Image (cartoon, coloured by chain):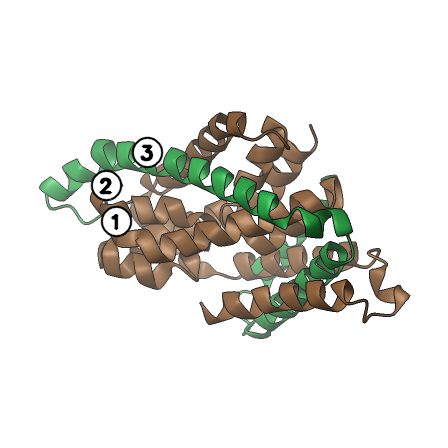
Chain colours: A brown, B green
Amino acid sequence: MKGSLIIISFFILGVGLSYLDLLPQVMYNDGYTMYILYLLLFCVGVSIGCDTTIISSLKKYGYLMFILPLATIIGTIIGSAAISVLIKDYTMAECVAVGCGFGYYSLSSIFLTEMKGPELGTVALLSNVTREMITLVFAPLLVLVFGKLAPISAGGATTMDTTLPIITRYSGKEFVVIAIFHGFMVDLTVPFLVTFFASF
Amino acid sequence: MLEVVLVMISGIFIGYLLRKKNLKYIHKFISVSIYLLLLFLGISVGGNPSIMNSLSTIGVSALIITIGALIGSCSLAWVVYKLFFLNRADKNIDV
């Protein structure tokens, strides 16, 4: 939660500084963002590669571990494609690309900014921040309506870090390993699915 | 976006090779690059009058997409829970 607030503050700081025209022209050159993005992707890859708990939990639960991440991904794609009929400003593929951020707002907003411009990037940022917030606030309600796995699916890519404590509390300790692996799998698909749907 | 795949896979590979080392600082790198990227995104949003003027409609679109994504994923999570997890819980198998 604290981490999310810091990240959002950086975004708001950027908006404020540039809205008030307080920055030198060189700061508006977005050529370097792509390099920072690659650095980020590389570091995310390294942190995934050196995480040995993932391999050991795979050995314990087998194929069952893959079913929930798959459900989250397919459900999100179907849900955001269906609801895109209510949205006039963006195409169905763009709405699905936003949905495929799975709560990973930093990465998804940056990809969509690079590929589709800052407007869709902002949609992705707000949409995916909201996804994390709703998961944190409504986890007990989600369990009541959709069962114990719902907060994990709702949390999307965040279930290995920010939303893990809330999942542990409302879904139960027995779902911690499933939540971590779920977050890991969904996390991994964000760059691929977002760029895939943004390419239409 | 072939670069994306290559960069990430090479990261995973190197991370796997270095898995016995203490890689705590990698999370610092991740945080700092996220801060920088979001700062730059904010800068391009704040300097773009058409986005600033339509922030409320952008926010509404974002919320609608989130609700769709959540209903879709939670519905399938309910199906998975009923099909694969409830039975195991009944038989007292550790899930």
Nearer the viewer's eye, disc 2 or disc 3?
2
Tell me the quadrant of the picture where the C terminus of chain A can be found: top right
Q: Residues within 10 Å of mark 2 (few under 14, many from 20)?
A: few
- Give the secondary structure at mark 3: helix
**Nearer-the-camera pick, A60 or B95:** B95
Chain assignment, label 2: A
How far is the residue under mark 2 from the one under mark 3?
9 Å
How many residues crowd mark 1 within 10 Å: few (<14), some (14–19), many (20+)? some
Residue B75: numbered disc? 3
Q: Amino acid at mark 2?
A: Val
Whole-percent x, y for residue A23 in the image = 83, 70
Residue drawn at 67 percent across, 35 percent down: A198
The residue shown at (63%, 49%) is: B55
**Where is mark 2, residue-wise?**
A145
Seen in the picture, residue A183 relative to A15 is either above or below; the reply is: above
Residue topped by disc 1:
A141
In whole angstroms, how far apart are the C-alphas of marks 1 and 2? 6 Å
Q: Nearer the viewer, mark 1 or mark 3?
A: 1
Q: Position of residue A26 (x, y in %)?
A: 89, 65
Circles 1, 2 touching at the beta carbon (< 8 Å): yes
Front-most of residues B57 and B70 = B57
Looking at the image, which residue is at 25% across and 37% down?
B81
